[in-house]
Amino acid sequence: MITVHTIAALKEQLAIFRSTTQSIGFVPTMGYLHEGHESLLKKARNENDVVVLSIFVNPSQFGPNEDLDRYPRDLERDLAIAKKSQVDIVFAPSIEEMYPTKMKIHFLAEEQSKVLCGASRPGHFEGVLMVVTKLFHLVSPTRAYFGMKDAQQLAIIETLVRDYNFPLEIIRGETIREEDGLAKSSRNVFLCEKEREEAPALFQALVLAKEHFQKHRSVIDAIQKATEHVTKNTNAKIDYLQLLEYPSLAEVTEDSQEMIVAGAIYFENARLIDNQIFNVKGE
Ligand code: AMP
């Protein structure tokens, strides 16, 4: 495994691999790796000749009052996990390397970015699209891997790739969870003991909403069920709980087939998100 911190070194290493290999699998992350990231790396390892992992806490996707400064970081630990996952190249650039000058061209994501996290984190997805575009150009992967845990991000990146003809395939990875259902997240370290006990209520609420919707087809009632469950079982503040069509993220209609019920809740020091994606007919 080779770790590089500069674009020049990344290009040099990729050139060596490109002369002898067919496919490059790419897993972009913000580091502080956990089993969710590892499952994407495993998928990438199984499906490609070369695996590239990026570790970059991207400032352009954080709002002014968000947790950029205290986002957990531990490169040494991440490198050990990457090595165990048989990564070939780790790209861990500095902010200056990725953004040497002020960015003067920005993305404008449409409907898909106006709901859920996009509504509570203005500019977030534009920042994601900025960094992902840069990384896609730097790595030129055959396949790029994203987790369904961040289902809105995944849907918007799929739109980016389709709308702008990026020559790569986006592969979806299942959400990896703790035994009690809590979705693995780098931010879970910010939960105190009591919050950690309460946190699975978000997942449980989303499952309840999904099951209620599948039985009764009422978005309002399904969300009501989820809201009651979170309110009863946690001291968290609800940011949103919503049921929409997926991946369009439009309002549910009679014709909707694929749905998402997604939620975000605030604990004292962590905002947690989770979702359930399901077909109207069953799973
Ligand atoms: P992050 O480091 O949080 O930016 O996440 C990097 C990638 O890992 C994204 O594609 C996430 O969707 C994915 N990811 C994060 N948590 C999980 C999880 N619990 N299960 C599966 N994928 C995840």
Image (tube, rainbow, N blue to C red):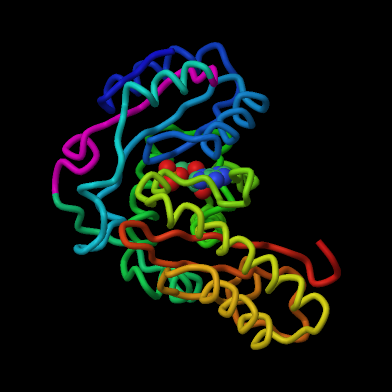
- Pick whichever, 16 or 29, lies toward us: 29
Q: Quadrant of residue 250?
A: bottom right
- Pick whichever, 79 or 132, lies toward us: 79
Image coordinates for residue 166, horizontal then vertical, percent? 51, 47
The magenta stretch is 85-101
The residue positioned 45% from the left and 70% from the top of the image is: 113
Relative height, residue 9 to residue 225 (above, below): above
Q: Residue furthest front?
A: 194
Image coordinates for residue 33, horizontal then vertical, percent? 44, 34
The residue positioned 36% from the left and 34% from the top of the image is: 55
With 263 as the anchor, is 9 left or right in this view?
left
Q: Quadrant of residue 31?
A: top left
Q: Is residue 4 visible?
A: yes
Q: Is residue 166 visible?
A: no
Q: Quadrant of residue 128?
A: bottom left
- Pick whichever, 65 or 231, lies toward us: 231
